Amino acid sequence: MKYFLTLLLMALTVLACKQKVLSGAELKNKLIETMQNFLDKDDHPGIEFKVKDVNYYTEVKEKSYDCVFHVSMRTAKTDTLGTMIAVVSNDFKKVDRKR
């Protein structure tokens, strides 16, 4: 019985730690959040970025997402909407901005 409980706890731990596969609106929101964190990480004095929308394509071989982000940029004098292209890793830890 003691071994059974140990085995059961180990199995539950493995299943609970499995990365959740995101899709649809959850994935879109996570990509927006990841890019927003990437932009906020760097110090841009006087510039405020806000990610509005994302279009993405899943790259299965590279285990990443090719993304086109629509970003609002505000300064004290201007307000503009632009496009940023980036590759986001499957684990959402690495962002490689292309343009």
Image (spheres, grey):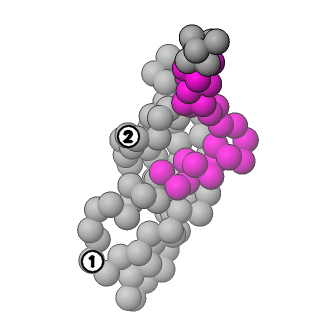
Label 2 secondary element:
loop
Q: Position of residue 53 (x, y in %)?
A: 61, 57
Under circle 1, the secondary element is loop
Q: Is residue 58 visible?
A: no
Residue 53, compared with residue 79, is above or below; it is above
The residue positioned farthest toward the front in the image shown: 1
Q: Is residue 34 above or below residue 48?
A: above
- Report the magenta stretch's main SS: helix
**Disc 1: CA contacts within 10 A as few (<14), some (14-19) or many (>=20):** few
Nearer to me, 91 or 99: 91
Q: For mark 1, what is the residue?
A: 45
- Residue 30 in the image, given as x and y percentages of width and height: 58, 49
Separation of residues labelled 1 and 2 (CA atoms):
23 Å
Out of 7 and 18, give the one closest to the viewer: 7
Which one is in front, 95 or 70?
95
Which residues, given as a range, are shown in magenta?
A: 8-34
78 up-or-down from 12: above or below: below
Q: Position of residue 4 (x, y in %)?
A: 62, 12
Q: Is residue 64 left or right of residue 29?
A: left
Labelled disc at residue 94: 2
Looking at numbered disc 1 in the image, what kind of residue is underneath it? Answer: Pro
Does 87 sit above or below residue 28? above
